[in-house]
Structure formats: structure tokens, C-alpha cells
């Protein structure tokens, strides 16, 4: 490849962005359909500025008091540490911030005063009869409607609430195609708004997202908590899944029925747990149940009055908790899916569909059970239900089985993938130590390229963990090192397992997109059938294999649950709307509070009090913004920014001397001179004579590049952080990238050298020396089967110069251990590269 290839002057996106959007509002909203350009889309229609509180730290005496109390709470300082620190500060002359606190008592009083601005938790006793004896179970609850009123009263959040459902479309070059992202773009919200009382003006739903799950507080697991988290679906995902005010809040602490080995497994004990759960949960819903019938009058910050009707739109939970919420009998029931009536023996068959459960049939079954226990038990067993009244029936328009949603974290990453990984380990073990070592060492699972926010694994076979996010990262890396080990000849069952894993990765990538269109939903439906066929073929192979302990029974719920994901997306938007990930992040602070701030007695009261303090400080922190300028974003021209400069500039001769050990730098001076004489005219600098670079010409090397790009998924700005560093944390790291080579052609490259230079009377320029990769024509059969994109590196001596403005985004390239200089594009790293590779294969 020529070293003086003409560069493109500026970044050209590889995905043509839509030129206009259409938003079709619900008929009840009274709003007309609007058409917007790309720059206009997503801007709130209500443009009035929210009122600004000049002293948001009140009721603290000063901003300094607030900042200190926030630090003390986050740092989990104990009493002596707090008193010692305050004593020291009191002896320091006053600076910009004034501190009036004198003791821990003052601080606790300030915390309590701040928390008093929010509705507090209440402790309730729930009486439940068990074995003819009435017992009381303690539940800490803050009704979710009280929490909703706090949100509604916050002027910073007011402009962000979305009240009217809408259907949104983007133009794909031929027609407007509907897409789904936020909950209000789904059909469920549309149907709810249509069902509101027609005689009530400006009737809109206030939509809740609820999560509940037990968590171990103590390291040995004997002390547990049962938090309930609430989020508001009327707020954008960046707010509700973020960490600021408007994000998730612990609003309840459910009772845990004490373990009883003698009773475990007995029907009465099982029923007790469910009755306690639903009776306790009512304490969170009691105000919402009433307002769901009558509505609640509220005037927004812009003066528009609305009638708000509470709705449970989404229930976010793992399978075990979904069984508790829906009151199904779980894995042992005849119909173990909380959403549909699929029989137990058909869970693995994704090609079949079964009726969706309804609240009405469950209520009718319970009515029959009250009239005749024997007859009712038969009806309930056929439906896989427990004979308990469901608390969610009390909130109108909150269809339980519509609210239950696929959770990728537990159903896929820590569920189905965990089973596939277990099969992989068994098959590798059956091939012997050499195969295991080849997988982990020679085929480089440990050398999978580093990437920002991607967990890296030194070993797979001999490690175990429970973190679903790590399972997700591991799934993205496992296929490549196994390709040349589990061939069809070496292991037919292992080869078929890789086909299952490949389809799993396709589905997980499709499902994980942050925006879905009719096209992507069709792709999910099609790939589900592929996965179904590959899994059935694997079961057949496993039955014929002599390898012991392979899984033959795939009739368990997590194989089936993603059958409903397309329905979930159409009803409630994309998968991150109902993910448990942001909710489980809240378990960490609760555990830290237990270990560092409680005395082990009345744990729930202490933890919730401190969490209440923390949340009240978050409310006060929000309007203050950043305290300093050190974390302020760095503005830069264009979409790339060089960083990590070398300590001293190098002469062009010094750089060329690297060619003694790396042929990429051979003839650096000549090649670069040819390049800039060709490139400068494309930047509008007409040269009157050939530009000659002296041997002492200075070049400023940089080892870090930040690249902004517009995502092919949701058209928002994403950022990649690329390294070109011989010693990055003790290891060489030279990342890969996708670049715009010409106006029509993109290609992958590996960074070799990034630099900035200044030419007198012309100006500064930024370039990179890179090693290009060429796409292999006529993909191999293996690549077609596993949907892989393979590229081949040109010799390093054929390295080329490119302007930094030609970078599109970063990329991860995984070497093929069997074929020198050939690499696979890791297209499951994120949704953007996944869609770009799909489009590339179609071309």
C-alpha cells in the first residue's frame, strides 16, 4: 500500500445519519405530529427555564457545612474521626468556605434537618397467620407516591418529565421507520394513556419502575437485606439510571422470613414467604393504589395542570424475584414462565409461542379456589400459580405480566451464558490438558486486547465468580480462542457448541442496542430461530457424545425468557429500561453502610437512616455542580484530541533511527516528506516548491488519542480512548482504529506513532503513522458460519501516514492464532461496531 495515500481532510461518518425525524403524539395529548431535523430532535418542547435556588444547600447553615457533611458521609467517618477533623478545622483560620459545625451532634442534627425535607421512612408491623398463630413481620416503607411528590416538587427535574406517549420515526432514505428507545415510545404507555378516564382533562400516567431483591450484607452471608428500589419512567434514561437526584431510590426494606430447615420445602412455609412479601409490599403501594383510581391533580413548573394516574409500568427483577412478584410456582410448576403459559417441557423450544398470562385468569382461579379448594388447586396448578392475592392487582392499569421484563444481567449473562460457559469447560477438559492450555495460553484468552471498561481475564477454566457484568465481558472474548481448538474434526460437540455461542452473541448484541427499529426487531426474531435450531442440534450432539456431564435438559426458564424480548421492546422500549444493573449498584453502598456505620443491631433502621441522609445530600448537591475546574471537560476542535505528550520533542532523524528495530520507521523522513507535500494542498496550502524537511526538524510525539464519534445506534456522541504507548502500565499498547481512508473507503489500522508538528508560516498539523489492514476477499467457511469479519495486516514496512481527522472510532482486533497477520474484528464489543460490521458485510 502506498505510503503517500491522499488523506481525507475531515472525518466522514461511515453511517449516513437520518436527515429528519417524525414524532406522532397520542391523540389524548392534543399535540400535532411534528417533523424535526437531526439537530432539533430530542429538544424539549417546554423551553421555560426552571427556577434556580440561589442557596440550594439549605437547611445547612452554609455551603461549607453541606460540603463537609457530604464528605464525612461518603467517607464513612466514625465518631472519633469526625470530632478530630472538626477540631482541626476549627483551629484553622477561615477560608472561602465557612464551617460552623462543632461536634458530631451538630452534624447529625444537620443531616436530620436535611433529611426532614424528604418524606421519611416508616416502620410497619405486618400481621400474618402461620400454623394458626399470628406473627408480625417488620417492614420499613416509604410509599412510592411520597417519593414521586419529592420528584415533582424539584424544579431541576421539572423540565425533564415526559407526560405524553409518542411514536417516533426516523427516515431511512426511503420511508419513515418507527424506532423504540424510552418507555414512552412503546405501545404499553400508549394503551395506558388511551385507557385513562376520557372525561378528565390532561390525564397522564406517572409510571413507576420497581425492583426488589435480597442481598447479603455481611461477608459471611448471615445478615441479609431486602431493599426495594423505585425509579420514574417519565424521566429520561440518563437521569433515572444515573446517580444524581431523579435516579433510583431505596424506598422499602422488606421482611425476610427466618430460615427454618424443618419447614423448608413444605407448602405452608412456601406460602408464608409469599404472603409476607405481598402484605409487606402493600405498604409501599397504598397511596398509589388510591390515586390510580382517582388521579392526582398536579400543576407543573410551567403552570400546566395535569391529572396524574400512578401506574406500575416495569418490574425489574431476576427470575426468582419475578416468581415472587407473579406468584407462579417457579421451576417446579407446570408453566414456569412468569409471562406466558409455556409448558415446562417446551422451555427450550423458541420456535413455538404460547398464550400470554392475564390478571383476569389468575383472579378467576383464586376465586374458584376460595369456593372449592380442591377444584381451585387444580386450576391453579394448571396455570402454575400460588393461591395468594397479588398486591399489584390493586394498582389499576398495571398489568403484572406486561410489567415483568427480560433482565439481560441474570437471564443471559449470569444465566444462559453461564451454562454455555460450563459446557465449554467440560468439553475442553475432555480434550485434555493440551487443549485447555491452548485455550488459555497459546490461543491467548489472556492476551485478548485491552479495551476501556472491558474486564480482562488471565484465566477462564479455573476461575469462578458471581458478577454478571464479568460474565458479559467474558462472553465477548471466549469465542475467538476456541475457534482453532474446537474444530468439527477435533470435537463435533464442541464445534456445535461454538455455533450456539456465536448465535448467543448475535442475540445479546442485538438485544443490547439502545435504540431499536422494526429492522432490528426483525433481526432478533430471525436470530432466535437460528439459536433455537443450533441449540437443538447441540442437544443431539451431546446425546451422541461420550463426554460425561454434558447438559441434555435445557428446559429451564432462562433458556426461554428471551423469547419475549421483542414484545418487551415494543411495549416498554429498549432493554436498559428494565435492566437490574443500575439497581444492583445500590447494593454496594448498603453493604458499606452495614460494615462501617452500624453496630449490627436494628440494621434496617440504621441503614435506611443513613441512606436517607445520603439521598438528601444528593438533592442539595445537584444544583451546585462541580466544585472546581479540574474535572471540567476539555474543549477541542474537531472530533479528536491528542494527549499524553512525550517529555521532549524528537528530531525527524531520531524518529527514523527507530527503523533499526522496527521496519515501520524505515525511510521515515523520505516517506513523511512525500506525504506532506501531497497532503498540504488538500488542506488549502498550495506549495510553490517541494517542501524539504531538515534532519533536525522537530516532531512532538503523543501517546493518547481521544476520539468522539456519532453512534450508529442512537446518533449520540460516544468517545473512544486510544493508546499508542510502548509502556502503558508496564506493557506496550498500540490500539486499533477504524479510519476513513478515502471519501468512499474505510479500513482498519493499528497505531504505530502519533505526532504533532509545526511548519513555519503554514501552521500545526496532527498525523499518525499506522499499519493498515486489508479485508480478505472470499471469506472462509468458518467466518461465514460464525459471522466473523477477518482482516489481514499489510507488512509493517508498508506503514502509511494519515491525518488524525480521518479517525472514525477505535476498534478491537483479535489475532487468529493459526494464521499469521490475520485478525478478527471483535464486533460484539459495543452496539456501534456491531452495526457497522453488519452494514460492512452487506456492502
Image (spheres, rainbow, N blue to C red):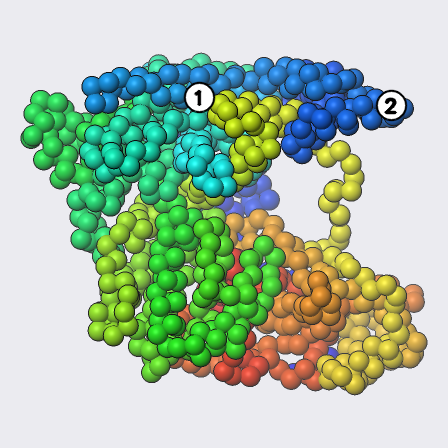
Tell me the CA gap for discs 2 and 1: 42 Å
Name the residue located 35 percent from the left edge and 21 percent from the top edge.
137
The picture quadrant where one finds residue 567 is top left
Residue mark closest to the camera, 2 vs 1: 2
Is 271 situated left or right of 714 in this image? left
Q: In this view, does 262 lie above or below 252?
A: below
Rendering coords of residue 274 (x, y %): 28, 30
| Helix, strand or loop under label 2 | loop
**Is residue 754 at all visible to an observer of this figure?**
yes
The numbered dot on residue 140 is: 1
Name the residue located 25 percent from the left edge and 74 percent from the top edge.
545
Name the residue located 52 percent from the left edge and 28 percent from the top edge.
600
Q: Is residue 349 above or below residue 27?
A: below
Q: Which of 665 and 198 is in front in this view?
A: 665
The numbered dot on residue 256 is: none
Is 217 situated left or right of 392 in this image? right
The picture quadrant where one finds residue 91 is top right
Q: How crowded is mark 1: few (under 14 residues within 10 Å), some or many (20 or more)?
A: many
Is 153 situated left or right of 296 in this image? right
Rendering coords of residue 334 (x, y %): 17, 44
Q: Nearer the viewer, residue 584 or 763?
A: 584
Name the residue located 44 percent from the left edge and 34 percent from the top edge.
224
Q: In which quarter of the image is the N terminus?
A: bottom right
In this view, the residue farthest toward the front is 262
Q: Mark 2 points at which residue?
A: 91
Is 63 situated left or right of 45 in this image? right
Sequence-wise, the earlier of marks 2 and 1 is 2
Q: Which of 191 and 602 is in front in this view?
A: 602
Amino acid at each position: 500500500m502506498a505510503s503517500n495515500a491522499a488523506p481525507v481532510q475531515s472525518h466522514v461518518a461511515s453511517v449516513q445519519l437520518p436527515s429528519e425525524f417524525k414524532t406522532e403524539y397520542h391523540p389524548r395529548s392534543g399535540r400535532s405530529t411534528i417533523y424535526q431535523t437531526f439537530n432539533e430532535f430530542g429538544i424539549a418542547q417546554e423551553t421555560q427555564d426552571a427556577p434556580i435556588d440561589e442557596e440550594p444547600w439549605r437547611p445547612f447553615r452554609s455551603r461549607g457545612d453541606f460540603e463537609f457533611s457530604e464528605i464525612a458521609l461518603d467517607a464513612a467517618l466514625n465518631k472519633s474521626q469526625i470530632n478530630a477533623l472538626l477540631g482541626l478545622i476549627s483551629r484553622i483560620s477561615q477560608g472561602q468556605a465557612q464551617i460552623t459545625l462543632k461536634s458530631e451532634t451538630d452534624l447529625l442534627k444537620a443531616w436530620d434537618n436535611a433529611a426532614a425535607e424528604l418524606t421519611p421512612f416508616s416502620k410497619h408491623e405486618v400481621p400474618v397467620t402461620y400454623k394458626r398463630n399470628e406473627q408480625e413481620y417488620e417492614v420499613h416503607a416509604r410509599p412510592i407516591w411520597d417519593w414521586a411528590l419529592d420528584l415533582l416538587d424539584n424544579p431541576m427535574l421539572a423540565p425533564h418529565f415526559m407526560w405524553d406517549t409518542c411514536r417516533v420515526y426516523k427516515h431511512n432514505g426511503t420511508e419513515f421507520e418507527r424506532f423504540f428507545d424510552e418507555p414512552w415510545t412503546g405501545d404499553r404507555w400508549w394503551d395506558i394513556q388511551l385507557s385513562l378516564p376520557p372525561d378528565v382533562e390532561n390525564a397522564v400516567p406517572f409510571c413507576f419502575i420497581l425492583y426488589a431483591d435480597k442481598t447479603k450484607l455481611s461477608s459471611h452471608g448471615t445478615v441479609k437485606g431486602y431493599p426495594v428500589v423505585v425509579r420514574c419512567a417519565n424521566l429520561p434514561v440518563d437521569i433515572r439510571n444515573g446517580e444524581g437526584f431523579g435516579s433510583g431510590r431505596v424506598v422499602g426494606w422488606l421482611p425476610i422470613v427466618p430460615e427454618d430447615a424443618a419447614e423448608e420445602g413444605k407448602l405452608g412455609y412456601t406460602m408464608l414467604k409469599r404472603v409476607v412479601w405481598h402484605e409487606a409490599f402493600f405498604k409501599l403501594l397504598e397511596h398509589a393504589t388510591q390515586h390510580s383510581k382517582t388521579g392526582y391533580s398536579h400543576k407543573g413548573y410551567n403552570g400546566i395542570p395535569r391529572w396524574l394516574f400512578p401506574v406500575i409500568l416495569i418490574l425489574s427483577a431476576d427470575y426468582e424475584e419475578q416468581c415472587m412478584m407473579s406468584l407462579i410456582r417457579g421451576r417446579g410448576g407446570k408453566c414456569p414462565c412468569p409471562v406466558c403459559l409455556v409448558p415446562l417441557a417446551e422451555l427450550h423450544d423458541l420456535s413455538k409461542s404460547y398464550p400470554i398470562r392475564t390478571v383476569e385468569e389468575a383472579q378467576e382461579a383464586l376465586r374458584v379456589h376460595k369456593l372449592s379448594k380442591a377444584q381451585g388447586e387444580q386450576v391453579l396448578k394448571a396455570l402454575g400459580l400460588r393461591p395468594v392475592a397479588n398486591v399489584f392487582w390493586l394498582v389499576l392499569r398495571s398489568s403484572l405480566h406486561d410489567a415483568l421484563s427480560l433482565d439481560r444481567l441474570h437471564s443471559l449473562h449470569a444465566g444462559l451464558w453461564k451454562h454455555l460457559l460450563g459446557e465449554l469447560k467440560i468439553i475442553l477438559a475432555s480434550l485434555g490438558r493440551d487443549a485447555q492450555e491452548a485455550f488459555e495460553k497459546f490461543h491467548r484468552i489472556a492476551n485478548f486486547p485491552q479495551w476501556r471498561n472491558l474486564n480482562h481475564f488471565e484465566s477462564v477454566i479455573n476461575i469462578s465468580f458471581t458478577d454478571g457484568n464479568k460474565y458479559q465481558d467474558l462472553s465477548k472474548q471466549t469465542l475467538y480462542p476456541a475457534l482453532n481448538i474446537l474444530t468439527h474434526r477435533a470435537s463435533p460437540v464442541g464445534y456445535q457448541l461454538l455455533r450456539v455461542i456465536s448465535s448467543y452473541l448475535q442475540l445479546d448484541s442485538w438485544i443490547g442496542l439502545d435504540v431499536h427499529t422494526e429492522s432490528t426487531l426483525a433481526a432478533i426474531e430471525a436470530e432466535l430461530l437460528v439459536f433455537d435450531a443450533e441449540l437443538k442440534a447441540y442437544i443431539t450432539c451431546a446425546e451422541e457424545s461420550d463426554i460425561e456431564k454434558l447438559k441434555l435438559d435445557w428446559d429451564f426458564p432462562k433458556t426461554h425468557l428471551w423469547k419475549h424480548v421483542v414484545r418487551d421492546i415494543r411495549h416498554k422500549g429498549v432493554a436498559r429500561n428494565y435492566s437490574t444493573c443500575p439497581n444492583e449498584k445500590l447494593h454496594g453502598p448498603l453493604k458499606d453502610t452495614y460494615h462501617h456505620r452500624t453496630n449490627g443491631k436494628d440494621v434496617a433502621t440504621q441503614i435506611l437512616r443513613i441512606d436517607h441522609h445520603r439521598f438528601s445530600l444528593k438533592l442539595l448537591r445537584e444544583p451546585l455542580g462541580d466544585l472546581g475546574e479540574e474535572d471540567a471537560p476539555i474543549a477541542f476542535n474537531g472530533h479528536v484530541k491528542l494527549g499524553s505528550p512525550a517529555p521532549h520533542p524528537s528530531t525527524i532523524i531520531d524518529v527514523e533511527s527507530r527503523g533499526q528495530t522496527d521496519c515501520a520507521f524505515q525511510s521515515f523522513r523520505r516517506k513523511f516528506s512525500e506525504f506532506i507535500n501531497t497532503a498540504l494542498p488538500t488542506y488549502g496550502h498550495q506549495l510553490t516548491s517541494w517542501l524539504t524537511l531538515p534532519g533536525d526538524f522537530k516532531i512532538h510525539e503523543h501517546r493518547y488519542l481521544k476520539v468522539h464519534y456519532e453512534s450508529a445506534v442512537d446518533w449520540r456522541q460516544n468517545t473512544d480512548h486510544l493508546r499508542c504507548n510502548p509502556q502503558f502500565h508496564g506493557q506496550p499498547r498500540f490500539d486499533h482504529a477504524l479510519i476513513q481512508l478515502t471519501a468512499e473507503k474505510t479500513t482498519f489500522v493499528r497505531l504505530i506513532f502519533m505526532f504533532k508538528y509545526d511548519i513555519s508560516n503554514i501552521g500545526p498539523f496532527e498525523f499518525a503513522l499506522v499499519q493498515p489492514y486489508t479485508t480478505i476477499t472470499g471469506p472462509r467457511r468458518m467466518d461465514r458460519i460464525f459471522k466473523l469479519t477477518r482482516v489481514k495486516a499489510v507488512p509493517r514496512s508498508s506503514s502509511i501516514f494519515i491525518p488524525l481527522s480521518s479517525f472514525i472510532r477505535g476498534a478491537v482486533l483479535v489475532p487468529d492464532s493459526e494464521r499469521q497477520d490475520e485478525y478478527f474484528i471483535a464486533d460484539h464489543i459495543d452496539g456501534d461496531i456491531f452495526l457497522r460490521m453488519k452494514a460492512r458485510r452487506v456492502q
